[in-house]
Image (spheres, rainbow, N blue to C red):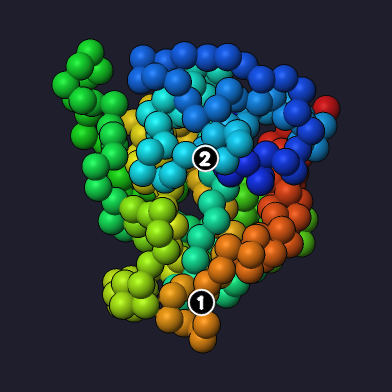
Amino acid sequence: MNLGIIGGTGALSLFRRHRREAITTPFGAPSARPALVEIAGARIWFLARHGDPHRIPPHRVNYRANVHALKILGVDSILAINAVGGVSEAAPAGGLLLPDQLVDYTWGRSHTFSDGGSAPLRHIDFTHPFRGRLRDCLVEGAARADVEVVNGGCIAVTQGPRLETAAEVALLARAGCDVVGMTTMPEAALAREAGLDYASVCAVANPGAGLEDGPITEQSIAQVLDEAMTRVERLVGAVIEGAAPSA
């Protein structure tokens, strides 16, 4: 497995960087130069989804360039690290969830490589958007590292960058969603088009709007994510160790 990670700038800070790679794609520049980072003794590529420093809103991310850049670098599996809001009781603040389904509520994003240009028109099967070896490795790695995760759930993907209203969160709950984020689509579908395995680790940063009293603040989100990211780091390390070939 040649693993690459797409995550926020905060996730990049978890890992030791060795170098960055200047890269161009037919779809423009990626959000940031991919960084070669060290995790559990292995060196893998990390791409900061929102740029470095963090500046690009979810609807402006060049998802096509990001996915294509990692493929150019030889990546065959993409692990997405996503900060999300909790919608169902299965996703309390501070928890980690490995989604197995999604509902896409975004619009206006460049969501396919089949845009009428040189790329052939493809109708990919997207029945199970996260199914693959990498997701299996996450489940196995969580057990080995004693990291508690919710195995399965549906992520709603909204436009952002604003957070949702209480009525919207209630609607997502009725639709069967467990968490809500802003960046899984079109990233997951583009990875499928590119022939790359794709899985997500969702760190629940806050209860969804209207599920608790009081406003949702950026400060409280940052505090919850700081703690959750230490468990994400352990989980990613366990995946790397589990995927390493035996001596």
| Residue 121 position in % (x across, y down) | 19, 25
* Left or right of 213, for residue 61: left
Q: In which quarter of the image is the C terminus?
A: top right
Query: Going 47% across and 39% down the picture, which residue do you hit?
Result: 56
Under mark 1, the amino acid is Pro
**Label 2, label 1: how far apart the Cα atoms are:** 23 Å
| Residue 116 position in % (x across, y down) | 16, 21
Could you tell me if residue 157 is visible in this image? no
Classify 10 Å Cα crowding around label 1: few (below 14), some (14-19), many (20 and above): few
Q: Is residue 132 above or below residue 224?
A: above
Q: Name the quadrant containing residue 34.
A: top right
| Residue 26 tag number | none
Q: Is residue 179 above or below residue 234?
A: below
Query: Going 51% across and 86% down the picture, which residue do you hit?
Result: 213
- The residue that label 1 is drawn on is 215
SS at mark 1 in the image: loop
